[in-house]
Image: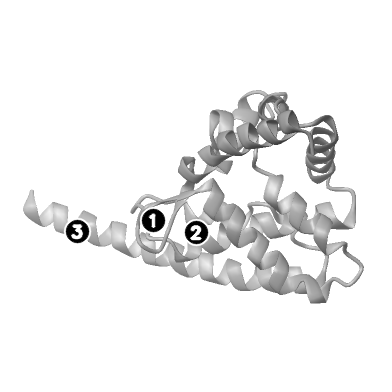
Amino acid sequence: METHDLFGILEFLRSAERLKATSRSGFTSAGRPESVAEHTWRLCLMAMMLAPSFPDVDFAKLVKMCVIHDLGEAVHGDVPAPEQARRVAEDPSATKSDSERRDLISLLEPLPETLKAEVASLWDEYEAAKSPEARLAKALDKLETILQHTQGENPPDFDYRFNLGYGRAFTSGHPLIAMLREELDRATERRAVEADAMVEKIGREGSRCA
């Protein structure tokens, strides 16, 4: 490897480090905001755990997609799914994909051309969700997000029921994915009911104090 290529990789890695401090909409079980890097780590772990059930999927390619799928968020951060839905409802052309791809390409700029092309190609394939690896990566991405929301110490006004419809188009194919989705939907509904009860309790206590 040429020296300038190595320096370019280091520059890219320094920029990608921002994902360690880029927050997502969910919270950890300890009650602090989850980072994009933490989501990516468990997504890769999930892929590793479930890979034996998908023998026709190229595992190395799957994990690469999982590693890079949110890289563009190192530039302008994460846009929570409810906010994405709101923006699209107001303007159907306002998709997250275009702006995130521009951010990704800017982040990849220091890399050697071969690496730059590989990462961009993997990201495009993931977004298109046509290949078996991309479809599985998309499904696991949605499931990991929902899993985190069901176990996080979230704010009282957290919208759990949004997740009952979230990512459903990507989690209804393979029987194992569908089974996971059903279990996470049950956990989501339980958290929603608990949150409703807590809001009602706070309301009653507030009325007594007034």
Helix, strand or loop under label 1:
loop
- Would you name the residue on which mark 1 appears? 154
Relative horizontal placement of residue 204, taking residue 1 as reference (left or right): left
Residue at 80% x, 35% y is 120
Q: Which image quarter: residue 133?
A: bottom right
Q: Mark 3 Cα within 10 Å, few/some/many (few <14, many 20+)?
A: few
Name the one closer to the observer, 84 or 126. Answer: 126
Q: Is residue 13 above or below residue 195?
A: above
Task: Name the colour scheme.
Answer: one colour
Label 3, label 1: how many angstroms apart (C-alpha)? 21 Å
| Total marks in image | 3
Which amino acid is tagged 2? His
Which amino acid is tagged 1? Asn
Residues tagged 2 and 1 counted as in contact (Cβ below 8 A)? yes
Name the one closer to the observer, 101 or 193. Answer: 101
- Would you name the residue on which mark 2 appears? 149
Residue at 60% x, 29% y is 87
Relative horizontal placement of residue 209, taking residue 22 as reference (left or right): left
- On residue 204, the disc is 3
Helix, strand or loop under label 3:
helix
Where is the N terminus found, in terms of image quarters?
top right
